Amino acid sequence: MEVPFISSGAMSRTHYSVVRKVENAPSAQAADQLLLREIESVRRRLADPRLHVKECQECLILLLYCSMALVVASPGDLDFALPHAVNLAETGQSTQSKRIGYLFCAEVMSPSHELQLMLINTLRKDLESSHIPRICLALDALIQSSTEDVIPAVQSRLHDLLSHSSPHVRRRALLVFRVLSRYDAEILARIEGKVIKRIKDSDFSVSHAALIVSTHFKRSDKVHAAISDMLASAWTAGEHKSKRRMLLALLEAFRVTSFSGFWLILLTALLREAFLVLSSIPCESISSAQTKLALSPVDSIRYLLASTDPNQQYLFITCLGCLDQTLWAGTLPDTVAILDEWEAERVMKLLDSSDSLIRKNTLTTLHGIDPAIVGSFYSQLLQRMPSALSIRDRDEYVSRLLEIGEIQCGGDGELYAVQLRELLADVDTKAESLPEGQPIIESAVERILVHVRSMDISGRIGCVTTLISPIVESESRIGSTLMVIISALVCEYAGKTSISPVAILRGISSRLSLYAAAVQDACLLSMLRLCAECSQVPDDVIVSTKDILQLSRRHITRRCEQFLNLSSQRHVLTEIISKAHSSSLPDFVASLSEYQSTDSHPEIGRVVKPTPSGLSSLRSTGASSKLRYTAYETPQPTPSLRHLTSRHRSLSQASDVSSSFGPLARTMTPGELTLATSDNGLDRLTQTGDTRRPSPGTITRQSGSDVNMEISSALDDLASGVNLISLEAPFISELMVSTEPDFQGCWEGMGDHSGRGWCEASMDTIVRRLQQLQHRLKVIAIDQPPYEGDLKVLVQAASQVDSYRCAALRLRESDDESCLWRMRCEDDELRTSIKRLLDEI
């Protein structure tokens, strides 16, 4: 393309001619030859002592152009032109002359060049000038190229320039301090007050530069407070362009600095709102902008993934869920995954978070990428479920599985019911070997009923029908937990399913004898609710209920009698159902209890609780009828000589109370509880406490004097074990508590001291060689958390200060029995010894 000289931007005709020749060269080698000849020509011209200033500027520009335009050849040493450049920067009268001199020195002069001192002197003179362009040129030169030697010469003047009247000077001075802080970190601490003032500068360019410098004040509360004030003012400012620019600058500062309190909440809310806005924008528009800017929205939140704070983890996964998976997961052929491999691994680790909301959002996000990921995780979790779990741990484990099932099935009620039956059947099978049998998983019952109620009406009916259908099949096995769920659903959805109420009633009654009393209670209530839907109750149901009545205790006996009385009174049941607040089982029970407590229905016997006066009269009558002599007074326990004064007083008070309220109403004193902390005393006092709480309806044969004497004997034995050391002695040693280092805590706490490598030996060989170091090793299996898939080794070396130096290693074996190792260790000696051992294998 032909460009005339006047429009080319060339400095001179010679410059324009050289550029034209290079552009028209037939090859890169020919162009390089032209450029090398031009460099030699410039060298000869600069050797002329009568060279004019304008010609010197032209030569320096030509040298810079030739050195940058060379493709293959090297420009060689251009130091021959440095004296002319330094002289031009020193003696140049125009701004253009000085700019060319400073530019050539910044591009060519090395930091150790002998002319650096002359250039520093020139920079100092220009900084002290009153001419603003000269000051800006010197500041630009320092920003572009500076050395450690320049700090003493310009530091005081730079401090004054921070308060210069020109915003161009103030902005450049701040950036110069930022560059010089690479050589002297303390230089920024001396201008902390100035930086705070410049953050609040009226000129946006100066304030922005101050915010850039403030990112180096990570532990300055004053700087943080100034940025927070700027956030408040920018947030409340009117809608204009400068507000958006300032908010962006503040967000950049927030990437590095740490804030707390209200401002952290405000920043979190702002980030969350930004992703909510992105969720309403079409995916194609975001993808186009992402490609054009080479920047993904995920880049602004990926730092949260490395945090162990649950709040930041929740913010990350909720923001990630606002984006379409195709924007970051690389699921489409023409897209790439935004997250690195270790970041994807951290996302999968969120499935094991202790926070249920984090787990639920992670499951939803992964299910949107590929449902097979969630299905595979569910299968692995179900297979790894231990059989010997406590009731609490089993509740937590089943709740985790139910979380996954809710995400997998979505609103499909029938699919959810099938998966639920299979899950509870598997749990019941593993619980059969336990001594306590099949306990009811209460958390699962509540979670399932709440989830069924959250479905739409079609999904609800489909789920309930599928869950209830096995009840009419005589050969089907139904566990305790599922039976309670079915009873609750039968009560709530009676008459709304396609299954006959009579068939359901027969199915429940035929299984009554298989369950514990708690399950039988729920079954009898649901059967009573079903009777309102049946024109006639089958005889076999009545017979089954009477059989249970003969074998049960008082509560179930009363419930059976209640069923037998009301099952034939359909109008009464209809009235009870109509008065219930809802169709749920708890509301039905509440309405039934309210009906039972009224006097308008004498056919339902009320349970009359005996009053204390009645009980006392019964006791007095029974005692008078059996005792034929005057009872002895309650004997007073004789205190041991070894008893402390406080314990003697406690026993005296206890005996006084027992004489007035009876021996079984005695309360243990704080002194007795203190002595009961020993093993033998605790067992004896526990046994004594058990004898003081007889079951209802039984008569104890232990007198009040026997109880008191047994407690006194137990306390005597306890006193004999503790009287050798005075309780008031000032030199009682404290319990020594040994702390076991946590692998995950050690690994995440030593993130700045990492190393990795490849070893040709297997993991077993590495562990055996580590044992030769004579340090304590803690090995965590591959399938155990944390970091499943890696063999975890924690090396602990005892130091001289009675603490522990730790090294955390993660080993991952390949198919050829070689091993990738990653190590984190803060102690240089221990890290070096382990690395040397790994290199020698």
Image (spheres, rainbow, N blue to C red):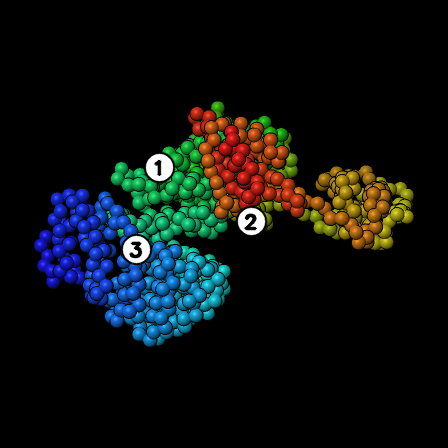
Q: Residue 73 placed where, x, y %?
A: 24, 45
Q: Mark number for residue 370?
A: 1
Q: Is residue 204 visible?
A: no
Above or below, comparing residue 469 to residue 83 in the picture: above
Where residue 441 sits: x, y (%)?
54, 37
As drawn, the label of residue 822 is none
Q: Which residue is mark 3?
A: 79
Residue at 59% x, 45% y is: 602
- Label 3: few (<14), some (14–19) or many (≥20) C-alpha neighbours in 10 Å: some
515 sits to left or right of 310: right
Q: Nearer the viewer, residue 47 or 802?
A: 47
Tally of numbered tags: 3
Give me the residue at 30% from left, 70% from top. Answer: 134
Distance from the alpha carbon under mark 1 to that under mark 3: 62 Å
Compared with residue 416, is residue 232 higher up or lower down, i.e. above or below?
A: below
Mark 2 or mark 3, which is nearer the start of the sequence? 3
Question: As drawn, which residue projects farthest toward the top?
Answer: 475
Q: Quadrant of residue 159?
A: bottom left
Residue at 88% across, 47% down = 642
The amino acid on which the numbered mark 2 sits, given as a three-letter code, is Glu
- Looking at the picture, which amino acid does disc 1 mark? Asp
Above or below, comparing residue 75 to residue 683 in the picture: below
Q: Position of residue 247 (x, y in %)?
A: 35, 62
For the residue pair 298 and 484, the one nearer the viewer reads as 298
Q: CA distance from mark 1 to mark 2?
A: 52 Å
- Residue behind mark 2: 594
